Image: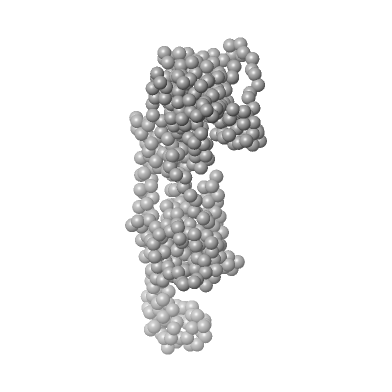
Amino acid sequence: MSLNWREIELILEELPLEGSTLQSVVQHDFHALSWHLYHPSHGRWTLYTEVGTPYSRLHMANRPIAVQQMGKTAKLQRFVQFCRANLEGSRVIAVEQTPFDRMVSIRMNNHDRVLHLHLRFYSGPGANIFITDEHDIILDLLYRRPNRGERSGAPFVAPEQKLDDGGKFAIRERTDSSFNRQIEEQYGQESNTQTLEDLLLKIRSKRDRELEQIEATALSLERKMLESGKFEQFKKMGDLLSANAHLIQEHMKVVEVDDWESGQKLSIPLKQTLRPSLQIQAYYNRYQKAKGTFENAKSEYEKVSQELQEAEAKYARLLTLTDNEARDIRQLKRELGVETVDKVTKVKAPGLTIQSGQYTLLVGRNAKENDELLRHWVRGNDYWMHTRDTPGGYVFIKFKRDKSVPLEVLLDAANLALVFSKAKSQGKADLYYTQVKHLRRPKKGKTGLVIPTQEKNLSVTLDEGRLARLLLEDEDAKK
């Protein structure tokens, strides 16, 4: 639970705030900041504050705190950058706690400019941190809540005076001579436990999504092998037609020949539009195409099966906890791609960024986005895909070393290229794809226009289910 006002009062009595100079500010996540200070008598020390969580508190920090977050870095950067620009170098000249309240106000002097740091350790939306000027106009705040009148430029409204609670709130049982040290130890353990549980929940969710995608790819490849696995039948028909070429006439729909295996008559369908001499070759072509499809699907299936085993083993290791809780937390955060707050905010690519299994797809929806992606977001080994002879967006498949692009990823990219083209209304299209290094820009060409070489062809029919999954995952990623 959060600290009550009596506990906050006790903690403030132990802190050497007055006379300290703020040297730096670090934001750990959406709710927590460390204020690094220097006091002439006590030396360097750190004040840790956390608001808006079940562990809302302030205390002196004696242990290092990881600077990590799992959300929108830009929101975090705004407040901490304001603190660094306006508060660092300030000296604390007064500290006041609102009577019988969890509200702490710190008055600071920054080269004769007076600023106030108000920390409100309330529960729910009441929690916040404000920086105001000497007239109590809000300069910046941790959480912007316009509906409550809490925004930059608005007047800061101090809480109404409360009455003594008559002993309703008591200081918890003391276990350490330093209440600051006791709170740090107690809340650190509780917070770590909660953090570990949250991380495990996220890892399990990530595992389920990833394994489901891999299994869906494997199932699709199994179906493709089953459909194309009868390629020997096309060769047999080609051989039978070759042996009975004299029976094939113009515009025939079917021809009956003797099947040397069964000893019975076999009806072989023909294409009325083809000349007799081409009917045999048509079956041999179908044999080669089906054989190639089968062998490619088989090769991809073996890779996907290996990928599935590796993913299962990886998540089994991650979810097997050791006796080192801090190390477990670090490994889980690393797997989830946790970024440090102090890193430069990642700039989002134009268009759509969609995940297809382990591959990232960048989708340009118009000429401007196509050109921007080409110039600044893709490299030579990335793949480019576009509808053939039809205007539309570009889809790029980001390259992965030592891996060929799976068929399922190509189909995902093809459906996106189709839906963002003028062929969408037809529901199907021919596409081509090649690596970006094989694209050439024509002189004085239109924005984003390229001429591909060494391209491969792909035909696709719009798959509404596949498209809905891709676009739904993109919406989920934005939330």
Q: Residue at x 46, y 30 (%)?
A: 89
Q: Nearer the viewer, residue 157 or 180?
A: 157
Q: Could you say where residue 385 lies in the image, as x and y percent from the top left?
A: 47, 64
Q: Is residue 118 visible?
A: yes
Q: Residue at x 39, y 41 (%)?
A: 334
Whether residue 184 appears in this view of the structure is: no
Colour scheme in use: one colour
Q: Does 307 sit above or below residue 331?
A: below
Across and down, in percent, residue 100 comes to: 59, 16
Give the percent coordinates (x, y) of residue 348.
49, 51
In this rendered view, identify the residue nearer to me: 16 or 337.
Answer: 16
Q: Residue furthest top?
A: 166
Residue at the image point whose x is 52% and y is 60% from the top: 369
Q: Quadrant of residue 440?
A: bottom left
User: Which residue: 54% across, 24% down?
Assistant: 107
Q: Nearer the viewer, residue 221 or 149?
A: 149
